[in-house]
Every structure is written in C-alpha cells, then in structure tokens.
Amino acid sequence: MDWADDIAYSVHDLEDFHRVGIIPWSEILSDKARDRIIDGALKVWALDPSNPADAHVRLKHAMDRIKLRTKMFPRVTDEVYNGAREQRRQLRNFTSTLIGGYVRAATLAENLEGDAVIIDPDASDEVRLLKYFARHYVIGLPALHAQQYGQKRIVRDLFSIFLKEGKVKNFGLFPTRLQYIWEDNSDDKPARLAADCVASLTENEAYQLHGRLMGTESGLVLDPIVR
C-alpha cells in the first residue's frame, strides 16, 4: 500500500502539476540544477533512520536514469503544456512507462514471517527523487502557502463560531444540517460537536459559509449554502 501511494504521489501528482505548468523540466534536467536537486532530496532522505551510506551516489544514478528516460518524450520536457495532441500522447506514454516500471519493481519474497514486499532499490530511488520534485516545486510555492494559511484561518474561524454559539444553544445562524449535529449528540463535548460541524462541510460550503458569517460575502438571503 505504501508503495502504491508513493507511485501515485510521484507520478500522477507530478503529471497534474505538469499540466498546469508548475514543473520546470528544463531546469530539473539541467546540469546547473542537478547538484542542488540531489542535495535537497538527500537532506529529506537523511531524516529517515534507514538512510543508507551511499544515498548520495544512489540519487545521482537515479537522476541519470530519469534524465535518460525523459529523452524519449521531448514534448513533455521541452514545451509548456497547452493540451496539444502530441503533448498529451507523450505525457500519457511517459507516465505509463514510469508506472509500469514501478509496479513491476515490487515483488513478493518468502521469509520466516510470511510474504514480504521487496521494492527494487533503483525504482525506489527514482520515486524518491520524483517526490522531491513535487515537494520542491509545488509544496514550496508561496502561493500554496498563502492559500493554506487562508484555509487554516477559515477552519479556525468556523470552529470558534460553532463552539461559541453552540455552547449557548444559539442555533439560529446554524444551517439546518449542522443543527442536527448538536441536537442528536447533546451529550458530547461542545468542542467535538463544533469540530464535527466543520468536518461535515465541503470545501465550497466552508468558503461560502465563512464569507457569510464574517460579513465579507453576503450573497443572497434565499441562497442555501449548506444543504
């Protein structure tokens, strides 16, 4: 399961980010950025207790293999994605090649404790690098950090409002669906009920309800935000 998650994160997510133009393949594959990327991935790997002594050499070889593989798909690495047919064809073939190789890299081996999954070290090293691409070029984006900061504030604000108003049983501003959470679970702690209210909202509902409660987006009076 962990290996399946790693493949999905390193390949499928990378493909999505490539489609929106966030992954700069020309920079990633350049000799200038090579050492910086490898050193960054090495620092992340160093946090793992199982970090091997030859980790640096292994990552260098993994980068060489990835770079060699991408030469087969120039429309992926040399062009800004715009949905052109050949771009889509090469991107699909590129991701399929990676996924197929990584799936085959997992084998079962008999041991004294039963079946164990063994992952080919070369494949594991490549996936580790691909995950670092996403970590560095996507998760490190200031725009993403700003978005996450705003989302955390929305969650905190909604929780505080639900908790404060729920304690005094002021359910007049609670959408009907959220009122049931308090009415049907009155023996639970208020903080738990407030958290359940926030967790029950979709992302769009949370945005709209927060705007309504904070007075930043009044919307229409007859518009049911939470159904």
Image (tube, rainbow, N blue to C red):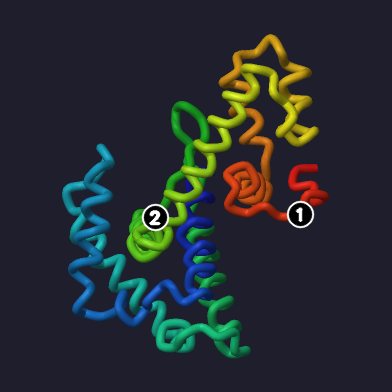
Disc 1 marks a residue whose amino acid type is Leu
Determine the CA span between mark 2 and mark 1: 31 Å
Q: Is residue 130 visible in the rendered structure shown here?
A: no
- Please determine whether, in this image, residue 79 is positioned above or below residue 159: below
State which quarter of the image contains the C terminus.
top right
Residue 29 lies left or right of residue 130; in this view the side is left
Q: How many other residues sit within 10 Å of disc 2, few (<14), some (14-19) or many (≥20)?
A: few
- Please determine whether, in this image, residue 10 is positioned above or below residue 44: below
Q: Position of residue 81 (x, y in %)?
A: 51, 83
Q: Position of residue 154 (x, y in %)?
A: 53, 44
In the image, what residue occupies the spot 21% across and 52% down? 43
Residue furthest out toward the right:
222
Front in this rendered view, residue 11 or 184: 184
**To which residue does mark 2 refer?**
145
Q: Which mark is residue 95?
A: none
**To which residue does mark 1 refer?**
220
Residue 32 lies left or right of residue 159; in this view the side is left
Q: Position of residue 10 (x, y in %)?
A: 45, 60
Residue furthest out toward the top:
187
In the image, what residue occupies the spot 62% across and 89% down? 85
